């Protein structure tokens, strides 16, 4: 008992606050002798590439009562199944600023009490696909806050929002160009959830429509005023909220295209009818043209005659 009251080598302990901090060691392993009184464990700036199953349950025979576990900036690449078993009271898990390439489907098993999960600046492309399998609602049913900034995400990596009780979802500084109709509907249904989405390269074409109305209609997006268009060039830097509804109206856009096509067809039909009329009446028209020509000729002859008379110098003298 007494042994485990002591602070692990190369860590700093604050018994009053129940905090053990182990920073910037070259260690590649987790310390195996965390004191039993610890409620907050901060391991930061170490070199831990893998979190194996039961990484915190084999603490040399002592059960941990951690409520906060911070593992940021450790170069963690792999989280194996059941990595966090033996931490039934854990409420906050910070895995930010790592280099995750593999997350087991069972990585977060047994974290029923978890309220906050930080995975910002931590997921490499391979791990993004695995994350949605690892984030089960039936395990993380009390998860309130999920931070996923800075992961180059293109979509929300959660298959069913209604499986959680999320209150805050942070998706800033990713690669999200749009949030589709289906996901917008799930957001509407999860009325309690607040979403952060600034610093994403939104594509402001008509496919943004349902997202645009969600921004305008619901107050679920906390940083709505800071969402900017990245595309098309003509709208670059414009806040999405300042777009007009016509700008994102697919019906409008389609109608415009359809109406041009329709106009073309109508003009073509008129042309064809005109040509047919000409063709069917070609005799009549010929006759009519001949008549006109004759009439013109008669007229010209009259003019010609008048002109000759007008230009007769004798007549001109008489007029003067
Ligand atoms: C585990 O505990 C034993 C005493 O019970 C001690 O001798 C040993 O050094 C401890 N191991 C670690 C890794 O702390
Ligand atoms: C981290 O540990 C691995 C071995 O597990 C080693 O190859 C690597 O050089 C270490 N990196 C640093 C920055 O110490
Ligand atoms: C990332 O996570 C850390 C926790 O380690 C938090 O303090 C920080 O605000 C987060 N950064 C962003 C951009 O959300
Ligand atoms: C955005 O995320 C990238 C990693 O994807 C990070 O390097 C960068 O510092 C972040 N930018 C801000 C403003 O947080
Ligand atoms: C988001 O939409 C995709 C399909 O577009 C779907 O697979 C996924 O489950 C949706 N996620 C949420 C949270 O609605
Ligand atoms: C709310 O959204 C609906 C479409 O879902 C839209 O018709 C309506 O105009 C929106 N209201 C506001 C105030 O934007």
Image (cartoon, rainbow, N blue to C red):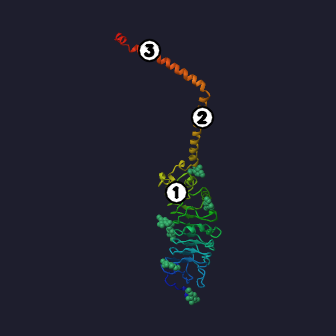
Kindly report the distance in space between the C-alpha atoms of the residues bearing marks 1 and 3: 80 Å
Judge: label 1 CB < 8 Å from ligand 4.
no
What secondary structure is marked by label 1? Answer: strand
**What's the residue at 55%, 80% (across, down)?**
38
Q: Sequence-wise, which precedes: disc 1 or disc 3?
A: 1
- Rendered position, 34 above or below 165: below
Please say whether residue 20 is visible from this viewpoint: no
Residue 179 locus on image (x, y percent): 57, 58
Q: Is residue 24 left or right of residue 2?
A: left
Label 3 Cα crowd, 10 Å radius (few <14 / some 14-19 / many 20+): few
Residue 156 vertical position relative to residue 253 in the rendered view, above or below? below
| Residue displayed at 51% across by 51% down | 243
> Image height check: is 178 above or below 287?
below
Quadrant assignment for the N terminus: bottom right
Counting from the top left corner in percent of width and height, residue 130 is at 60, 68
Residue wearing tag 3:
305
For mark 1, what is the residue? Answer: 202
């Amino acid at each position: 008992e007494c042994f485990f009251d002591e602070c692990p080598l190369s860590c700093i302990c604050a018994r009053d606050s129940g905090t053990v901090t182990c920073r910037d060691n070259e260690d590649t392993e987790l310390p195996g002798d965390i004191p039993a009184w610890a409620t907050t464990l901060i391991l930061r700036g170490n070199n831990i590439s893998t979190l194996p199953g039961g990484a915190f349950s084999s603490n040399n025979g002592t059960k941990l009562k951690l409520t906060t576990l911070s593992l940021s900036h450790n170069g963690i690449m792999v989280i194996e199944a059941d990595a966090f078993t033996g931490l039934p009271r854990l409420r906050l898990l910070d895995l930010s600023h790592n280099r995750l390439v593999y997350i087991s489907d069972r990585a977060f098993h047994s974290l029923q009490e978890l309220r906050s999960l930080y995975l910002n600046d931590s997921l490499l492309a391979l791990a993004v696909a695995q994350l949605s399998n690892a984030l089960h609602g039936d395990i993380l049913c009390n998860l309130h806050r999920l931070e996923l900034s800075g992961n180059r995400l293109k979509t929300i990596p959660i298959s069913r929002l209604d499986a959680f009780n999320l209150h805050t979802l942070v998706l800033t500084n990713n690669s999200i160009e749009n949030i589709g109709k289906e996901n917008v509907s799930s957001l509407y249904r999860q009325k309690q959830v607040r979403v952060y989405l600034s610093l994403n390269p939104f594509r402001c074409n008509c496919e943004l429509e349902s997202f645009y109305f969600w921004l305008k209609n619901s107050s679920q997006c906390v940083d709505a005023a800071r969402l900017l268009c990245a595309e098309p060039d003509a709208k670059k830097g414009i806040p999405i909220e300042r777009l007009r509804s016509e700008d994102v109206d697919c019906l409008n856009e389609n109608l415009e295209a359809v109406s041009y096509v329709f106009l073309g067809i109508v003009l073509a039909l008129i042309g064809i009818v005109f040509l047919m009329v000409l063709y069917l009446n070609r005799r009549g028209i010929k006759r009519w043209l001949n008549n006109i020509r004759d009439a013109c000729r008669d007229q010209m002859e009259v003019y010609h005659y008048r002109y000759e008379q007008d230009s007769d110098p004798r007549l001109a003298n008489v007029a003067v």
